[in-house]
Image (cartoon, grey):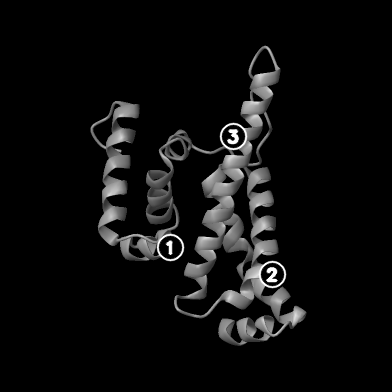
């Protein structure tokens, strides 16, 4: 059914595009929440993905599954959001005597582990979130990240080592 909706949306059918967004919004929002750890940020990221999807749908060629392509759009939006948030925090710190801390009341509190995962270097974080957070195989994560399966495995391995050191445990 996605194939028909995609084809119609690519031809400019707004109703088909709306149905496509409705079918995949929960998936995009859940992935955005795992990436950001904040329901407010997840809302912003999901909205940004929907906007980008409107402009990008015509470029979808079906070389990969739609959901894999959507992972990539969402991943890029989450990365952009994180970079923007980091820049904003740096600006606030530069103009205030003391750093401001985010005390926003998230609807759901992320676990300490996922917060630590989000603090990992970007590629390690991406690999762990796709493999463990999204349940993708290393091969599917490699397609999404545009790298080899071995590279994903290496990033996951390095992330596990870092997390183990962070938590001072034998196994994470």
First of labels 2, 3 by sequence position? 2
What is the secondary structure assignment of the residue under circle 1? helix
Q: Which residue sits at x=23%, y=32%?
A: 170
Residue at the location (57% across, 62% down)? 27
Res 22 label: none
Mark 2, secondary structure of its residue: helix
What's the CA distance linking mark 1 and mark 2? 20 Å
Q: Earlier in the sequence, mark 1 or mark 3?
A: 3
Instruction: Work out whether residue 34 or residue 96 is closer to the camera in this orientation and state it.
Output: 96
| Image location (x, y in percent) of residue 81 | 61, 45
Q: Which residue is mark 2?
A: 54
Between marks 2 and 3, how big is the CA–CA gap?
A: 27 Å
The residue at which mark 3 appears reads as 86
Residue at point 70%, 16% (across, down): 96
Disc 1 crowd, CA 10 A, few/some/many (<14, 14-19, 20+): many
Q: Is residue 91 above or below residue 38?
A: above
Would residue 29 be found to the left or right of residue 140 on screen? right
Q: Which residue is mark 1?
A: 144
* Percent of width and height locating residue 97: 68, 12
Expressed as whole percent of the image width and height from the top left, the position of residue 16 reads 71, 81
């Amino acid at each position: 059914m996605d194939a028909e909706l995609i084809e119609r949306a690519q031809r400019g059918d707004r109703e088909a595009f709306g149905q496509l967004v409705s079918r995949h919004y929960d998936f995009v929002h859940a992935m955005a929440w795992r990436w950001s750890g904040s329901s407010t940020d997840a809302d912003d990221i999901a909205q940004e993905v929907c906007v980008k999807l409107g402009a990008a749908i015509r470029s979808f060629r079906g070389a990969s599954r739609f959901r894999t392509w959507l992972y990539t759009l969402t991943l890029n939006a989450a990365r952009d959001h994180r970079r923007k948030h980091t820049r904003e925090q740096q600006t606030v710190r530069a103009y205030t005597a003391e750093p401001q801390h985010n005390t926003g009341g998230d609807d759901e509190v992320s676990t300490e582990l996922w917060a630590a995962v989000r603090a990992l270097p970007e590629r390690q974080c991406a690999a762990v979130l796709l493999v463990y957070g999204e349940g993708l195989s290393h091969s599917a994560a490699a397609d999404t990240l545009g790298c080899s399966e071995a590279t994903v495995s290496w990033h996951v391995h390095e992330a596990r080592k870092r997390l183990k050191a962070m938590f001072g445990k034998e196994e994470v």
